[in-house]
Amino acid sequence: MFLLGIISLVGAILVSILMGWGIITFGVRDMSILWAVVPDGVLWVIGIGCLLKPDTFGRALAEMAEHYGG
């Protein structure tokens, strides 16, 4: 779970940086960059949850993946 948390946080940071760059470059008028808000939030939650509560959050994440994975 530690590795998943680190990978998720690095991905969230990169998406946040790209979103900020897109807003600065194209302005707020072009709202197409905001498609990344939800995946960015999910990555932050997974990353922080896996690092702070690996026993409870990791188990819930594994059960959810098993349930939806087939």
Image (cartoon, grey):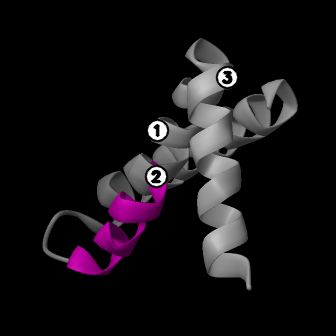
Tag nearer the camera, 1 or 3: 3
Measured as percent of width and height from the top left, residue 65 is found at 68, 65
Q: Is residue 63 above or below residue 70?
A: above
Residue at 72% of width from left, 79% of height from top? Answer: 69
Q: Main secondary structure of the magenta part?
A: helix
Label 2 crowd (10 A; few <14 / some 14-19 / many >=20): few
Quote the CA–CA distance across marks 1 and 3: 12 Å
Looking at the rendering, the stretch of residues picked out in magenta corresponds to 31-40
The answer to whether 32 appears left or right of 12 in the picture is left
Q: Which residue in the protein does label 1 denote?
A: 45
Give whichever of discs 1 and 3 has the lower sequence position: 1
Please tell me the numbered disc located at residue 68: none
Q: Which residue is mark 3?
A: 54
Label 3 CA crowd tier, 10 Å (few <14, some 14–19, many 20+): some
Front-most of residues 70 and 4: 70
Question: Which disc, if any, is residue 42?
Answer: 2
Q: Looking at this rendering, what residue extends furthest in the left direction?
A: 29
Q: Secondary structure at mark 2?
A: helix
Mark 1: amino acid: Val
Judge by depth and name the residue closer to the eye, 69 or 25.
69
Task: Give percent across and percent down for residue 47.
Answer: 60, 33
Q: Earlier in the sequence, mark 2 or mark 3?
A: 2
